Amino acid sequence: MSSVQIGLLLLLGISTFGFVTLSIDVMRSRRMKRSK
């Protein structure tokens, strides 16, 4: 694998991780609003 491919994979992993954490945060805030 070339350094470019490794860099792209890292970017993809970071963006996916950020999207997942963001969606979980949104779900939690929605649940908190409903319970209140």
Image (cartoon, rainbow, N blue to C red):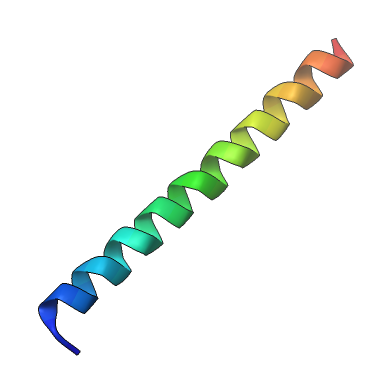
Image quarter in which the C terminus is found:
top right
Relative vertical location of residue 31 with respect to residue 4 in this rendering, above or below = above
The foreground one among 1 and 21 is: 1
Relative vertical location of residue 26 with respect to residue 24 in this rendering, above or below = above
Q: Residue 27 in the image: x percent, y percent?
A: 71, 33
Give the mark count: 0
Q: Residue 12 in the image: x percent, y percent?
A: 37, 62
Q: Residue 29 in the image: x percent, y percent?
A: 69, 23
The foreground one among 35 and 7 is: 7
Quadrant assignment, res 23: top right
Task: Please tell me which residue is depicted at 86% across the width and 17% down the height of the picture.
Answer: 34
Furthest-bottom residue in view?
1
Q: Is residue 33 left or right of residue 15?
A: right
Task: Please tell me which residue is depicted at 51% across the width and 46% down the height of the picture.
Answer: 19
Relative vertical location of residue 5 with respect to residue 22 in this rendering, above or below = below
Furthest-left residue in view?
3
Q: In this view, does 15 lie to the left or right of 10?
A: right
Image quarter in which the N terminus is found:
bottom left
Furthest-top residue in view?
36
Task: Please tell me which residue is depicted at 22% across the width and 76% down the height of the picture.
Answer: 6
Q: Is residue 16 left or right of residue 28?
A: left
Q: In this view, does 26 lie to the left or right of 34?
A: left
Quadrant assignment, res 28: top right
